[in-house]
Image: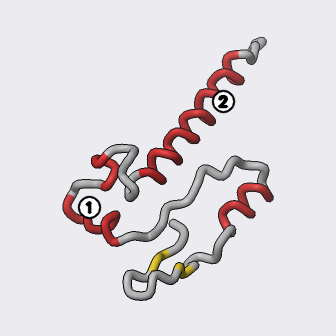
Amino acid sequence: MSHFTCPHCQKEIDIFSRGGAEHTARQYNLPFLGSVELIPSIREGGDRGLPVTLAGPKSPQAAAFYDIAEKLMIQAEAAAAAASNVIEIS
């Protein structure tokens, strides 16, 4: 989760301090997969058992989740390819 946009004044509020996860990922040489804005529809959908991702990748509320999933899939494929090049000798 990243920031929250106030529905009244439209001001972006950095609840968790902007860039913290990206900084930590760089510090530990890990890929930063993305961030998700705190929006009520995410909680509401979860409460109803209907996650926002059901709306598809073009939904503004679901797009960040799909983007993160795509990056994660790329990382997993790269790790699997790297592991298949390992020769183990017993």
Q: Horizontal and vertical percent for residue 79?
A: 66, 30
Q: Secondary structure at mark 2?
A: helix
Residue 28 lies in quadrant: bottom right
Residue occupying image coordinates x 67% and y 17%: 84
Gap in angstroms between the C-alphas marked 2 and 1: 33 Å
Q: Secondary structure at mark 1?
A: helix
Is 84 rendered above or below residue 73?
A: above
- Classify residue 90 as left or right of residue 9: right
Q: How many marks?
A: 2
Q: Horizontal and vertical percent for residue 20?
A: 68, 69
- Classify residue 72 as left or right of residue 56: right
Q: Horizontal and vertical percent for residue 3?
A: 53, 73
* Residue carrying label 1: 45
Q: Amino acid at mark 2?
A: Ala
* Residue carrying label 2: 79
Q: Residue furthest front?
A: 9
Is 42 rendered above or below residue 16?
A: above
